[in-house]
Amino acid sequence: MELTPLIAYATTIAVLALKPGAGVVAVISRAAERGFFGFFSYMSGALLGEIFYLGLVVFSLSLFEENFIFISIILKALASVYLIYLGFQALTRPSDVDLDGYGVGVVEGNWKDFSMGLMLTLSNPLVILVFGGVIPDVIGKQDVLITSFLVLALITIAVQISIDFMYCTPVFLSRKLFDKKMLNRLTNVSGVVMILIGLYLGYTALPATDLKSVIYY
């Protein structure tokens, strides 16, 4: 693949990552509550979701295009239920992760953050629209070799992590001032944020009767 479409692809991913939305709010909340553990766990899931859609675009775009609205509604509904569940768990269970991110619940916390990032990304209609409608024109309609796909995946990872890390840097720096009491408060705030995002996703999925109503995220 030539350099020009690669640069165009990186720019498209950067614009997508820079857009404020539920994903940005979620990754900041995970970084605030669990530090680098929460950030990288969440980002692992989010990146897997984007690379999954990249694979659909490259290898089976027709199925992706034909079922866009249906896929968006189903994924938003599933993400809504899951995020509300995680939010209530955060509010009803005491935090067992310390300020450094270690503790008896760290593995469970990493899995929850990973699955949250994956579900939010898969259910984000803007992500689906960009990968289904914009990316094919950016990279071209010709067959993409597996090596080119891997390069595009690496670009996705590098750009997305860089921008989200930029958003979370103030949180990482200020987190050094947190004590145990503040950490527990952040856990509660994070739970409320997850519930609100889940309710919003559910609300936007219910009246989705056309493409325009699905995209509002």
Image (cartoon, rainbow, N blue to C red):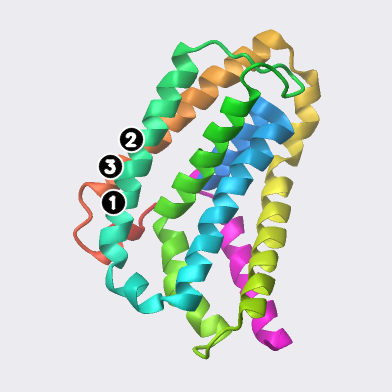
Element assignment for label 2: helix
Q: Looking at the image, is 85 positioned above or below residue 125?
A: above
Element assignment for label 1: helix
48 or 69, which is in the foreground?
A: 48
The reply to whether dot 2 and dot 1 touch (C-beta < 8 Å) is: no
Which residue in the structure is indicated by mark 3? 203
Relative placement, left or right, of 188 versus 173 is left
On the rendered image, what quadrant is the N terminus found in? Answer: bottom right
Which residue in the structure is indicated by mark 2? 81
What type is the residue that disc 1 sits on?
Ile
4 or 113, which is in the foreground?
A: 113
Q: Which residues are magenta?
A: 1-22
**Mark on residue 7?**
none
Q: Considering only order in the chain, which callout, 3 or 1, is on the residue closer to the N terminus?
A: 1
Q: Looking at the image, is 56 positioned above or below residue 195?
A: below
What type is the residue that disc 2 sits on?
Val
Relative placement, left or right, of 101 versus 211 is right
Residue 69 among those drawn in magenta: no
Q: Looking at the image, is 108 positioned above or below residue 148?
A: above
Which residue in the structure is indicated by mark 1? 74
Spatial CA span between label 2 and label 1: 11 Å
Residue 64 in view here: yes
Q: Residue 119's spot in the image, x, y percent?
A: 45, 46
Q: Considering only order in the chain, which callout, 2 or 3, is on the residue closer to the N terminus?
A: 2
What type is the residue that disc 3 sits on?
Tyr
Q: Residue 2's spot in the image, x, y percent?
A: 70, 89
Specify the quadrant of the image occupied by residue 35.
top right
